Image: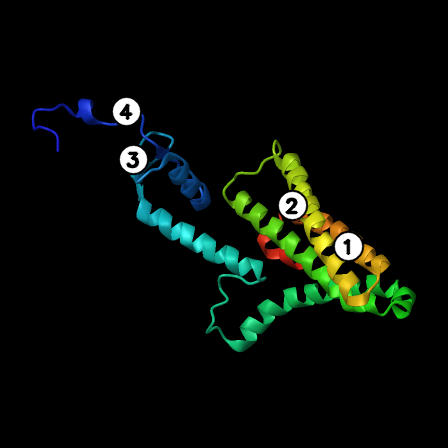
Amino acid sequence: VADTGTFISKIMTKDPNIIDPDTNQHEVARIFENADLVSAAVVDQNGILLGRITIDDVVDVIREEADESVLNMAGLKKEDDIFAPIIQSTKRRSLWLGANLITALLAAASIGIFEATIEKIVTLAILMPIVASMGGIAGMQSLALVIRSQALDQIGSSNSRLLIYKEAAIGFLNGILWSSVVAILVYLWFDSIFLGLVIASALMINLIIGAISGVSLPLVLSKLNIDPALAGGVIL
């Protein structure tokens, strides 16, 4: 506490952090985070003090947005309470389940193109889920990181290309590691060097494409004004 004889001009903050009343809550949370604020004044264009925002308010916003992001990853909305009416919840979830069915049918159709090959080499059908699962997980890892970075405003046009190259390199290195492991396991399992090389090559390509897709999808969806947290996982 300052002495009673101290002038206010000596202890006041002359360059305070102020918030415009039209600033959205996401931007306010980012300002508090970047400037390590505990409170900030809300001032209009005429310099009139309208009120203040405290860290308690911002914590509530951050928690709300975090909850919303988690729900969006599953294709849900914040209105989807666990105790919401059955019909209401069914309608909200059915849309993205339908979208997921369409993408699954497209994947099945692409596999059907190679039906003759699979009939000749039945073991490919046994090993395909490994390739698909690994690529899907690699893509989801990249997708989650990019969506989080977008929420924190860490990604822009200046670094998006670099991020794609980085994730592609990570996919390549993981591809070398795990395709080698899979090649050895397939050889020991089926006693076929050729089959091991085929599955290893497919896994390598899938990990790279999965990583690149996980980065590219949120960037493209954001430009189309589509929430990547809501649609990214389904499309991937």
The type of residue carrying mark 2 is Val
Q: Earlier in the sequence, mark 1 or mark 3?
A: 3
Mark nearer the N terminus (3 vs 2): 3
Question: Who comes first in sequence, dot 2 or dot 4?
Answer: 4
Q: Please give the label number shown on residue 200.
A: 1
Q: Residue at x 18, y 22 (%)?
A: 10
Compared with 138, 157 (above or below) is: above
Mark 3 highlights which residue?
49
Q: Which quarter of the figure has residue 100? A: bottom right
Alpha-carbon span between mark 1 and mark 4? 64 Å
Which mark's residue is nearer the viewer, 1 or 4? 1
Circle 4 Cα neighbour tier, 10 Å, few/some/many (<14 / 14–19 / ≥20): few
Give the number of the disc on residue 13: none
Residue 14 circle label: 4
Q: Residue 188, percent across and down? A: 76, 64
Spatial distance from mark 2 to mark 1, Cα to Cα? 23 Å
Earlier-in-chain disc, 2 versus 1: 1
Q: Earlier in the sequence, mark 1 or mark 4?
A: 4
Instruction: Tell me the kind of residue under disc 1.
Output: Ala
Marks 3/2 in contact by CB < 8 Å: the verdict is no
Viewer-nearest residue: 161 or 76 = 161
| Contact (Cβ within 8 Å) of mark 2 with mark 1 | no
| Residue ID at (65%, 49%) | 214
- Between residues 54 and 23, which one lies in front from this camera angle? 54
